[in-house]
Image (spheres, grey):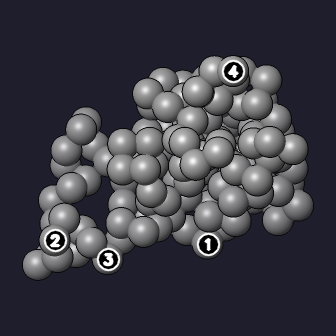
Amino acid sequence: MSTSVSHEQARRILDAGIAKAEEIGQPMNIAVVDDGGHLVAFGRMDGAIRASIDISTRKAVTSVLMNAPTAALTDLVQPGAELYGLEHTAGGMVAFGGGIPLHRDGELVGAVGVSAGSVAQDVAVATAAAAALDS
């Protein structure tokens, strides 16, 4: 079995994210990347803001690079904090909620990134999407 998220799994994750975004009434951009941060699946719902195409992908890549939810980085990148300036590295990381790493049997296999709503909405959609990894 591959150690990375498969295309089939990525499509399932994307579909789960779209379903949650429709449920809350917020069009989203949703990116699914593999364990190397490479795009496997992407969806831009009608009405989702264009700036969030890049942001959603960067959230997913950041989650892979840091092996952490992007929301966990917010406090760490504030002025005076341990990782201040992190978002200026690796081509531009994102340090606010909406990126969630995907794990299978304790191993990182990819990540999902969501953007276009409030941070809380992005996190809710990303959480629903990530839950579909092995469903």
- Residue 28 image offset from top left, x and y in percent: 68, 49
Residue at 65 percent of width and 43 percent of height: 104
Distance CA(mark 2)–CA(mark 1): 24 Å
Q: What residue type is disc 4 on?
A: Met
- Residue 121 image offset from top left, x and y in percent: 66, 67
- Where disc 4 sits, the SS reads loop
Q: What residue type is disc 2 on?
A: Glu
Marks 2 and 1, the one that precedes in the sequence: 2
Rendering quarter of residue 9: top right
Q: Is residue 91 above or below residue 6?
A: below
Q: Residues within 10 Å of mark 1 (few under 14, many from 20)?
A: few
- Where disc 3 sits, the SS reads helix
Distance CA(mark 3)–CA(mark 4): 37 Å
Q: Which residue is mark 4?
A: 1
Q: What residue type is disc 3 on?
A: Asp
Q: Residues within 10 Å of mark 4 (few under 14, many from 20)?
A: few
Mark 2 in CB contact with mark 4 (< 8 angstroms) = no
Marks 3 and 1, the one that precedes in the sequence: 3
Marks 1 and 4, the one that precedes in the sequence: 4
Q: Residue furthest left?
A: 80
Nearer the observer, 79 or 29: 79
Q: Which residue is mark 1?
A: 120
Q: Is residue 74 above or below residue 34?
A: below
Q: Which residue is mark 3?
A: 75
Residue at 46 percent of width and 67 percent of height: 71
Distance CA(mark 3)–CA(mark 2): 9 Å
Nearer the observer, 19 or 130: 130
Nearer the observer, 31 or 24: 31
